[in-house]
Image (cartoon, rainbow, N blue to C red):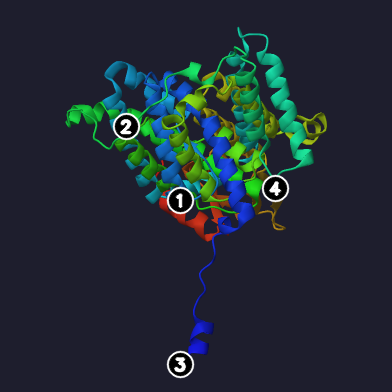
Amino acid sequence: MSPVLSAVNRPRLSRPSWLSPKVFRTEVLAGLVVALALIPEAISFSILAGVDPRVGLFASFTMAVTIAICGGRPAMISAATGAIALVVGPLAKEHGLDYLIAAVILGGAIQILLAVLGVAKLMRFIPRSVMVGFVNALAILIFAAQVPHLLGVPWLVYPLVAVALAIMVGLPRLTRAIPAPLVAIVVLTLVTVFASVAVPTVGDEGALPDSLPTLGLPQIPWTMNTLTLVAPYALGIALVGLMESLMTAKLVDDITDTPSSKTRESWGQGVANIVTGFFGGMGGCAMIGQTMINVKASGARTRLSTFLAGVFLLVLVVALGDVVAVIPMAALVAVMIIVAVSTFDWHSVAPATLKRMPYGETIVMVATVATTLATHNLAIGVVVGVLTAMVIFARRVAHLVEVTSVLDPDGTTRIYSVRGELFFASSNDLVGQFDYANDPETVVIDMTHAHVWDASSVAALDAITQKYATRGKTVEIIELNKPSARIHDTLAGQLGVGH
């Protein structure tokens, strides 16, 4: 083959988009803004979990860097989170940090196992109304988390927050070359430092580390008793972490109009938690607030911003800790308020939308929001929302089963036609749709337009057959589709109906 043809046929490697100067600048600046926003959050979550602030900061570093490589959703930020802190807090309080770390490592292993088993495919069963409730509850929680920083503080905090909000609302109308949150943070820091304004700073939230994280194993007895102790917490870490991460990934998919691999994200979260545990971190998962800063506020779209967020975080707290410590909390509070406002789905609560939306959809959204706010746990809110949606769906479908009948011209056979989906909710009313006393001696039940889904439906058909049999009448069930016939032939007469 000639060199020319060889060169033509040789596959060309795709050039990473972040090599473009414009994209590279956006990703770097976005990573810096996210890193600044991660610091007070990581410190707060460490306190919530009852561990040293270093544990949360190191976890945010290792989670972000690892998930940037292993994760399935580019530009999504994973770090130490409040949901994980709530799960591991009791374990750390009662048994210490080493047991917490062991639970994080085991939780990561469970996440990898769940990924292999295809847990990501369950995302298809989460209705849109639950997603809207998840987003709205998250926005409310993000805003509520800022309220303590606005109570019992010097009055100068309020004008500082107002200035930062004005910068972030107004600057994008002039230019998007530099992320508005970064400008707000720099401006407020310079003002407070040079004007010697005494307001709460990042340094007031807790001590920053002065050394790099080290690799090691938790100092625990490697026994079955230890496994029994940490396993429930590890399972909680795995389930809560995966649920929040997959929901956040789907949200970013919608915002960026790009797909992502949920299976890769699932096992990537597991790998990130294992790595975090080995470096003494408290574990974590996707962070919706910081992800929104990265994707919506800063315009990041690649893994580079996630990777740099972790790297910048470590550099800032270890090498530039004294500089980071003087950043006023007012700046970060303003950033998170903007994130909360932009995250909330205002269209979902507009009067016109609520008027058009089916009541069931609104009930599901409200149930998701209310449960999340009551428990401060997004995973519980999503589960309650899904269960509520299932109940409403079952009630709605249960009333869609229709039974009609005609009498054969010779008057010897009554033909019933069943139309709809037969399952535990709808089949309960099926038995009462037949005239057992007045029907002729032969009854035909035509199932052409029906589908049998479960044992309850088969039991209902058995009960109908039994009621006719006690009156000396025969029943023939016809035109079952293949799946319905399979379950009916397997279970008919075996469910104890009539005994």
Which mark, by number, is residue 263?
1
Q: Earlier in the sequence, mark 4 or mark 2?
A: 2
- Earlier in the chain: of badge 3 and badge 4, it is 3
Which is in the foreground here, disc 1 or disc 2? Answer: 2
Q: Are marks 3 and 2 in contact (CB under 8 Å)?
A: no
Mark 4 element type: strand
Q: Relative to 452, is 479 above or below? A: below
Q: Is residue 499 visible?
A: no
Q: CA–CA distance between discs 1 and 2?
A: 26 Å
Viewer-nearest of discs 3 and 4: 3
Q: Secondary structure at mark 3?
A: loop
Name the residue carrying label 2: 280
Looking at numbered disc 3 in the image, what kind of residue is underneath it?
Met
Sequence-first tag of 3 and 2: 3
Instruction: Give the amino acid at mark 1.
Output: Thr
Residue plotted at (54% across, 64% down):
15
User: Residue 172: x, y in percent?
Assistant: 74, 39
Along the line of sight, the residue nearer the viewer: 332 or 254: 332
- How far apart marks 3 and 4 lie (CA) works out to 74 Å
Q: Do the CB atoms of the residues marked 3 and 4 lie less than 8 Å apart?
A: no
The mark total stands at 4
Q: Determine the residue located farthest toward the front in the rendered image.
A: 194
CA–CA distance between discs 4 and 2? Answer: 67 Å
Disc 1 or 2, which lies upstream in sequence?
A: 1
- Residue 1, disc: 3
- Foreground label between 4 and 2: 2
Q: Amino acid type of disc 4?
A: Thr
Residue 404, which numbered label?
4
